[in-house]
Amino acid sequence: MSSSLPPKPRMVGPKVRICIIASKYNEQFTDALVENTLQELGELAPQGRVDIIRVPGAFEIPVMAAAVLERDPPSCVIALGLIIRGSTEHADLVGSSVTSALQQLAVQHRRPIIHEVLLVEDEKQAYARCIGAQLNRGKEAARAAVSMIDVFMELERSMPRNNSSNLKHRNA
């Protein structure tokens, strides 16, 4: 686990649209994640559009991400949630399921999905990652999103898509 935030990426332009999908569960912490993400995006993508969708819990985030990506997809999706471990394996099962589903969606749709659905041991860890300044995962999510948008924009500039659907791989 890192002990500090990654460096700030360069700013991105006005054509950027980002969708934050955040759980309402553990509201004190998830609200802070959303606010910190928005604050950082305001600095890194000041002219971009940010849509926010709130869902009941972490388990509902992937299905909402799928619904968003089936429409006019944003440049990036940021998934925010908090799962606090209890005395059963439920938290681990939800965390694993959410992680797998988000990764599958990102690959299937070829869109970055920033995964900050946090699985923590207790409220002390939740506070450090959602509200505290040093390990703030909301700010980290915004930085990762802008970095990935920049990488995808550069990929499109340097290696544009071949829009001909009838072409096969030439070396196959």
Image (cartoon, rainbow, N blue to C red):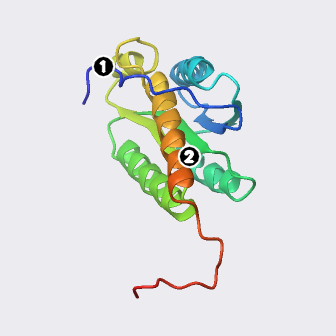
The quadrant of the picture occupied by the N terminus is top left
Q: For mark 2, what is the residue?
A: 153
- Is any part of residue 136 visible from this angle? yes
Which is nearer the eye, 85 or 157?
157
Which is nearer the eye, 102 or 5?
5
Residue 27 placement: quadrant? top right
> Dot 1: what SS?
loop
Q: Position of residue 88 (x, y in %)?
A: 34, 43
Identify the residue shown where x is 59% and y is 43%.
76
Farthest residue, direction right: 72
> Dot 2: what SS?
helix
Which is nearer the eye, 98 or 17?
17
Mark 1 Cα shell of 10 Å, populated few (<14), some (14-19), many (≥20): few
Amino acid, disc 2: Met
Farthest residue, direction front: 158
Mark 2 Cα shell of 10 Å, populated few (<14), some (14-19), many (≥20): some
Q: First in sequence, mark 1 or 2: give its number.
A: 1
Quick check: 18 left or right of 143?
right
The quadrant of the picture occupied by the C terminus is bottom left
Amino acid, disc 1: Ser
Quick check: 121 left or right of 161?
left
